[in-house]
Image: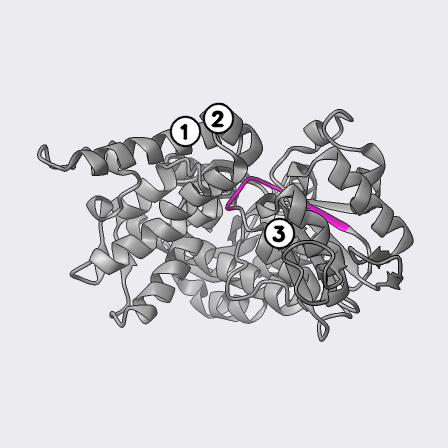
Amino acid sequence: MLMKDASILIVDDDQDVLTAVRLLLKTEVKQVVTEKNPENLKHLMSQQTFDLILLDMNFNSSINTGNEGFFWLKKIKDYKSEAVVIMITAYGDIDLAVRSLKEGAADFVVKPWHNEKLVETIKEALKRKGARSAQHIASSSSIIGSELLGESKSMEDVFFKIEKIAPTDANILILGENGTGKDLVARAIHQHSRRASKPFVKVDLGALTETLFESELFGHKKGAFTDAREDRMGRFEAADGGTLFLDEIGNISLQQQAKLLSVLQNRQVIRLGTNEPRTVDIRLICATNVPLSELSDESVFRKDLIYRINTVEIILPPLRKRKADIMMLAQHFSKLYSNKYMKSSIEFDESAEQKLLDYHYPGNIRELQYIVERAVIMSDGDVLSAKDLIFSPIESNTEPVDEVAELKLSTVEKSTILRVIEKHHGNISRAAKELGLTRTALYRRLSKYNI
């Protein structure tokens, strides 16, 4: 995890030590709490969560073991704390400090220390903590894969929920802005369900016209309409025994909702051009970028359908609210595209990291992915700096004055589309309406500009 996001507790009976460390760290970390009496540890840890604890080896306390540090280190573990512990020791107690590593401490520092060394030790311990946390989540739940990544608290909550619901057949509604990874979550649920060996069928409802809706979902008989040249099963039948993922469900009409509700209630489909019901066994996962508060408006979405598709909901936070995950994702994409384009491993310098962390990502993870891919393609070395990361052509203001008008118009159009989509929080239908486009036309432009 990042040092600037950390809450640190310092426990030492020397007030000079507490003051010195607090002054050193107060601009480096999110929070510094100091405590002279280790017997107050339980109370402090019950009040808030600490990422790291600096713990003295010896105290003038009622615990007279000669090595009080071991006693309190064990107590911290007994309190079920996830904090990493760094022991503070005098030079003559180094052997005890080394022993403390075997007892569960992350590291130790020797008094008197160099400030730079102490900061570096804390930074490394927090970094290892973040890596272990991600590894623990991956090994315990097997939910995090090569693409579904995150170590922020909000994503840990998502992984926990996936772990709980994946083995069930509960209907799932995934909520989140475009580009937040709803597709990846749906696939993770399927892969960790009892239906994993059966089909995973995705339907982009936002791309279906009124005339294609029934044919694509429920199938048709040869001759049912002009272009029906052969019998064809729909997506419900194709997903039989497995998982059906209906993306952009918030954008379908009330008439389409009624037809979908009937199938979900009866678990039977009737192909167009026939009267024969066909039983289907599917696990349903739906996703939308429309907030649940807007879906509950019955003039837009049927409440009985919401209850049918929403046994459990998973809300994916936008990337701007997952700052702790940005560099993990950026490094993942850097490695991915370095391999794809046969380049040596590419890292981010401090200026690049800061630029990535400061950006608001209206396009979420998908936008970060494209930013890193472009930077890797254009890089000449193995380190990316801030100037290598281009967020928007119109913001960079690097377009030549003699650029052709068509390119200028394309740039303006892309910028306008991005702004309107962000204004409507990723709702494609509303953005298309404001832009004077059909949903299909807007999707074509999103594809054209790689948005």
Q: Residue at x 48, y 65 (%)?
A: 97
Question: Which residue carries the number 2 mark?
Answer: 423
Callout 3, which amino acid? Glu
Near-viewer residue (225 or 200)? 225
In the image, residue 145 sits, relative to residue 180, either above or below, namely below
Q: Nearer the viewer, mark 1 or mark 3?
A: 1
Question: Which residue carries the number 3 mark?
Answer: 156
**In the drawing, does residue 409 fall left or right of residue 314?**
left
Q: Find residue 254 and report its image quarter.
A: top right
Residue 165 seen in the current view = no
Q: Which residues are magenta?
A: 172-179
In the image, residue 4 sits, relative to residue 65, either above or below, namely above
Q: Quadrant of the C terminus?
A: top left
Q: Nearer the viewer, mark 2 or mark 3?
A: 2
Question: Which residue carries the number 1 mark?
Answer: 419
Disc 1 + disc 3, Cβ < 8 Å: no
Instruction: Give the crowd class for mark 2: few <14, some 14-19, many >=20 residues within 10 Å.
Output: few
**In the drawing, does residue 246 fall left or right of residue 35?**
right
Q: Position of residue 232 (x, y in %)?
A: 71, 65
Q: Position of residue 113 (x, y in %)?
A: 33, 52
